Amino acid sequence: MLLPELVTGSDRSALRFPGAELTYRELARLTGHLAGRLRGRNRVAVWATPTLETCVAVVGALVAGVPVVPLNPRIGERELAHILADSAPEVVLSAPDVELPGPLAELPRLPVLATPADTPPPSAPAEPDGETPAFIVYTSGTTGPPKGVVLPRRALATNLDALAEAWAWTADDVLVHGLPLFHVHGLILGVVGPLRRGCSLRHLGRFSTEAAGAELARDATMLFGVPTMYHRLAADCAADPALAAAVARARLLVSGSAALPATDHARIAELTGQRVVERYGMTETLMNCSVRADGDRRPGAVGPPLPGVDLRLVDDSGAPLGTGNARGDGETVGEIEVRGPNLFLGYLNRPDATAEAMRGGWFRTGDMAVRDPDGYVRIVGRRATDLIKSGGYKIGAGEIENALLEHPAVAEAAVTGEPDEDLGERIVAWVVPAGAPPDAAELTDHVARLLAPHKRPRVVRFRESLPRNEMGKVLKRALDG
């Protein structure tokens, strides 16, 4: 069973948002009634605002065995029209007072209430088969419209259980986060995860270091966040000893969705005594790797593969570097391929894209990495945007970005490659300075000293800011000269 605590229906807190809270008993009644209204539908869309109503809508659909298409409330018109045409939801679920945009407003709407029901729900339907789709999550398209990733219940259950083992995650934990609820990190890990464990979620509605600190000072034991949140947390802990003390109380700080800079790792450790756990996953695979709660938490590493996940690195021809979950040499770069029960069923309506993404049962992630001798994986970037082939070397943008961030005059950094007649590609650094822009030669010498001369940027371009998406990832394709 995906959510066994809903059957138990205890009076323990399940979900709390600012100004609203539900116990497991109340959540079971609400979602049971909703499931009765959804039963038999083919697919539903959820207008995924960061609210209790979104959680009720999603859980109700899961109880009914109906696949959920979560929608970003800030989605653009063209992308929304594509997703609706591609996924063809029969109904949209949302809080009753939310105004829905154009094409979504034309769909039948089922308002979702988060007011506890007085009557017991109808008998629950039989638990769906593990291969039944649970979510269709749309990935950001770089060369075309977003693709719908079909995630089965089997992937959710096995992956969340693997994370529970790695993080010693139990019903006694209290999770706090302020992540959006339309993607894997905030919705599947951050909502379905605690509900599967039977623990409590404290969602902040919108992230702030003050609100996160208040929950950690009270009873929260775990914090999920993205690098931009941890960067703000580090800065505010330096200015507020009470916040630093609250963060120090946490059992586990988890960062994901992008690499956490080594500088932020070090600042948080110095200020709070906490070392952040990093993990690595994708929409198509859920989580592949994670540093364990009792493992070595070192900057730049996402730990070993999770239980049940096979991971290998392959060269440009697709030949494996070593075998399976083998240890590596810490230097050789290869593309990550994974297989296991965590994999998606395929891309909705795109058998061609599904076939292209697979190689003999292995999913081709497009992420480049090295394996350390102890089996830890270190991501160096995406093949398309972060692997730079310069002067005969394969160079990962991530390690150069971390090196740049160690310079006191650098606030933010991104590294890309651009064509070069002599080198093949030259390394370009995009830098947001921390104050007056430093001398470019000073930055290139800094990188050459920390890493190697062939990894120094050949060009440094200063900007007031870097383009980022809602999860804090730098949009490198939006960088231009």
Image: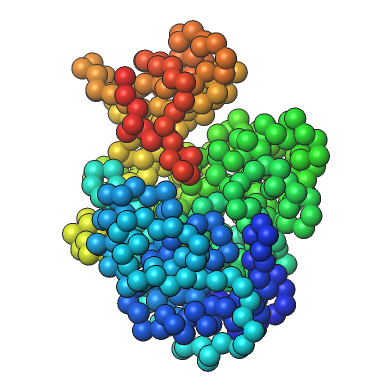
Of 392 and 323, the residue lying toward us: 392
Residue at the spot 52% in from the left edge and 18% down from the top edge: 433
Residue 222, image x, y percentages: 67, 55
Q: Is residue 330 above or below residue 338?
A: above
Q: Residue furthest left?
A: 352
Which image quarter holds the C terminus?
A: top left
Q: Is residue 64 visible?
A: yes
For residue 13, side relative to residue 129 (left or right):
right
Residue 139, image x, y percentages: 35, 53
Q: Is residue 162 visible?
A: no
For residue 30, side relative to residue 212 (left or right):
left
Residue at the spot 66% in from the left edge and 57% down from the top edge: 18
Residue at the spot 72% in from the left edge and 56% down from the top edge: 221
Residue 250, image x, y percentages: 73, 51
Of 420 and 413, the residue lying toward us: 413
For residue 21, side relative to residue 151 (left or right):
right
Of 199 and 90, the residue lying toward us: 90
Q: Is residue 472 above or below residue 420?
A: below
Q: Is residue 181 above or below residue 113?
A: above
Of 316 and 195, the residue lying toward us: 195
Q: Is residue 227 above or below residue 4?
A: above
Q: Quadrant of residue 129?
A: bottom left
